[in-house]
Amino acid sequence: MVDDWTLFEGPFDSDEASDAIANLEEQEDVAAAMAEALTEFLEDSQEYVEEGYVESSLAISCLVAAQISGIAPDEVAHHWLDRNPFTLDDDLRDLAAAAFALATRPQENYLAETYDPQSWTEFIAHLEPYRKALHGERQDPPEPFVPNYSDPQRPWLRVYWSDDRGSLPRDSSYQRRSDQLVQAVNGSRQWRAWWQSSSLQELILFGDLGPGPRTERTSRGRTTAESWFGFDHTYDLGDATPEQVVSDLRTGLSRIGDYLRLGPPPEFSDFEVQDLT
């Protein structure tokens, strides 16, 4: 086992994998960028599969597999494909199958060397749906997802705010007001009914409050929806009014509502906003 190294449950959990698939989103031709990355990996990794290289190439191969079958045990794949549809041909499929085999071989492979035998077996088992898809092997699709709304205390909405310095401090006035509002929305029957029409379990919003360019994206996964959205606030967030916090959250909820065709979100009630301090 390599010291200070975290075992990954899925192929998208490492920083290298996250960076690789994020970089693909910036490419004009996603399929061509995938083919180029996998070709380079196959050419350079026959003798030994290097750290970083293996994680990124495995993630790309698994995206190709998920595109083939629609079956993926990782929610990341469903979101990524929703945002980045691409045309798949036999050459890319063959590249992905070869790269997957190389990335998961048990010898001369940095990734395999970091796991103990039991953990490696579990990791490979997690990847089995991707392997089957790449080789055209039959596999039963998972049961249709059915969200569980039986617990009224279980939150369906999570919101994370940041600015150009990173995540907002938990004790900042903006974050405190947002937390109060999100708690009220999670407890509202009207808001809960609006969200339940999505047939998804959870909504995750990431809001960038600082000025400057940003990447904005919205997607639907198998069990969740998420949206990364931004503003161009130039004022000190410590001076934000309750009305501004309400407006920002409504922007995010309206955006995801439009994307999922849920209809206009409810209005915030006076009760939900009157105690924002």
Image (cartoon, rainbow, N blue to C red):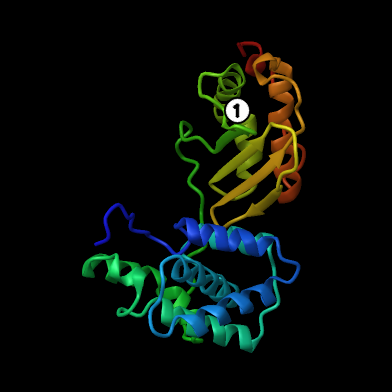
Residue 104 visible? The answer is yes
Question: In the image shown, does 191 or 95 lie closer to the viewer?
Answer: 95
Q: Position of residue 43 (x, y in %)?
A: 51, 85
**Residue at point 26% right, 55% down?**
3
Residue 203's quadrant in the figure? top right
Along the line of sight, which residue is nearer the eye, 240 or 181? 240
- Residue occupying image coordinates x 68% and y 64%: 84
Quadrant housing residue 124: bottom left
Disc 1 crowd rating (10 Å Cα; few below 14, some 14-19, many 20+) is many
As shown in the figure, which amino acid type bears the numbered disc 1?
A: Val
Residue 11, how many percent across, how many down?
Answer: 45, 65
Label 1: which residue? 185
Q: Position of residue 5 (x, y in %)?
A: 32, 55
Camera-nearest residue between 146 and 211:
211
Q: In this image, 215 relative to 138: left or right?
A: right
Residues 177 and 233: in front is 233
Quarter of the image with the N terminus is: bottom left
Is 206 situated left or right of 133 in this image?
A: right
